[in-house]
Image (cartoon, rainbow, N blue to C red):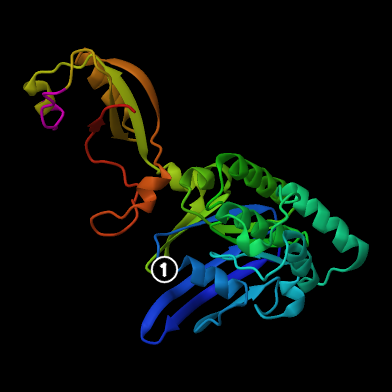
């Protein structure tokens, strides 16, 4: 299946500063892809190149199999910029204007404008678009992106400034769009939303994609199991046997979680039982998106490598 959006070694430089370096990925119909990275990592630049607002300095790419600047390809694109801006016009006129740019006209356009006003709760806002609140302007920008029923949605922080009810509504719209075979590529700092709805995630750091994969691949590192145990002895000799520092703050009977290498669970379960401990649960270790998003000491994402020895922490 031909990708809706493809980057092949894309780079972007401004004067003597490299903003993007060798960025390679693709977005296909029927998937939602989350784009993560700290402020200044290059997310907005990437989306701007995909939308035809900036030229790449190096590499190749395509939108709907054509040039990023091809008008027929861009008519199948819905785009929400990082900071939406509007002319001196009503919400209805702003949405109609977006539809006309996408080649829409007549009764079909009028019907789609009415539908978008209702979808994004904009129908009863009489003031001009530039005087709306930040959250209302964000909803208007989303209505402009959705009005043409595009094949691909590029969304730069689409839920910023939205209240929880509006975030829920946008989430449902994105899931419905995916079900209709649309491709969605969006950046966000709301990690819980990314984890909830995305099929894949791209992690950008300093202009490079340092990690990408499905949500399970990103959150379930291979080779690590978590055992939750209770009743382990508290004496320091026991902890030395386990090659760990003593835990003076641990209370008798308190449960702890132990990270162990997969494939060694029988060995460590027997060791727990022989030490008088009780196994409460066992399952694969699950990372959080926050742990992948935040830099480590070496400013690299977590590798997910299994520990050589067990590692303790209190269950959350």
User: Within the image, what quadrant is residue 259 found in?
Assistant: top left
> Residue 256 location in percent, x, y?
27, 24
Secondary structure at badge 1 equals: strand
In the rendered structure, does residue 294 fall within the stretch colored magenta? Answer: no
Q: Is residue 235 above or below residue 241?
A: above
Q: Residue at x 11, y 23 (%)?
A: 248
- Report whether 206 appears left or right of 194: left
Which quadrant of the rendered structure holds the N terminus? Answer: bottom right
Which of 78 and 89 lies nearest the eye of the viewer? 89
> Residue 307 location in percent, x, y?
26, 41
Q: Which residues are magenta?
A: 241-249
Q: Residue at x 38, y 50 (%)?
A: 292
User: Within the image, what quadrant is residue 84 found in?
Assistant: bottom right
Which of 292 and 38 lies nearest the eye of the viewer? 38
- Report whether 198 appears left or right of 96: left
In the rendered structure, does residue 242 fall within the stretch colored magenta? Answer: yes
Magenta: predominant secondary structure element?
loop
User: Within the image, what quadrant is residue 98 found in?
Assistant: bottom right
Which quadrant of the rendered structure holds the C terminus? Answer: top left
Residue for badge 1 = 208
- Outermost residue to the right: 107
Which of 133 and 147 lies nearest the eye of the viewer? 133
Can residue 121 be seen here? The reply is yes
> Residue 35 location in percent, x, y?
51, 58
């Amino acid at each position: 299946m031909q990708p809706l959006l493809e980057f092949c070694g894309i780079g972007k430089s401004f004067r003597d500063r490299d903003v993007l370096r060798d960025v390679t990925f693709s977005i296909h119909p029927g998937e939602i892809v989350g784009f993560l990275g700290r402020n200044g990592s290059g997310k907005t630049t990437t989306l701007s190149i995909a939308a035809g607002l900036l030229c790449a300095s190096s590499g190749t790419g395509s939108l709907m199999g054509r040039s990023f600047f091809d008008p027929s390809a861009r008519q199948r694109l819905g785009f929400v910029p990082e900071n939406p801006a509007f002319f001196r016009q009503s919400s209805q006129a702003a949405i109609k204007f977006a539809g006309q740019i996408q080649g829409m006209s007549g009764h079909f356009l009028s019907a789609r404008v009415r539908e978008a006003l209702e979808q994004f709760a904009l129908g009863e806002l009489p003031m001009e678009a530039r005087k709306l609140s930040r959250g209302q302007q964000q909803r208007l920008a989303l209505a402009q992106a959705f009005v043409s029923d595009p094949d691909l949605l590029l969304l730069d922080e689409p839920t910023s400034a939205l209240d929880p009810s509006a975030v829920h509504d946008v989430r449902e719209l994105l899931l419905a769009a995916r079900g209709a075979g649309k491709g969605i590529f969006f950046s966000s700092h709301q990690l819980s939303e990314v984890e909830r709805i995305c099929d894949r995630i791209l992690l950008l750091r300093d202009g490079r994609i340092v990690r990408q994969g499905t949500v399970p691949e990103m959150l379930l590192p291979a080779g690590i199991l978590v055992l939750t145990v209770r009743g382990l002895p508290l004496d320091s000799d026991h902890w030395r046997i386990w090659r760990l520092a003593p835990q003076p703050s641990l209370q008798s009977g308190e449960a702890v979680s132990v990270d162990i290498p997969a494939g060694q669970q029988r060995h460590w379960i027997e060791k727990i039982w022989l030490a008088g401990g009780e196994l409460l649960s066992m399952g694969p270790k699950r990372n959080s998106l926050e742990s992948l998003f935040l830099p480590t000491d070496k400013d690299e994402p977590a590798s997910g490598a299994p520990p050589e020895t067990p590692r303790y922490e209190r269950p959350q």
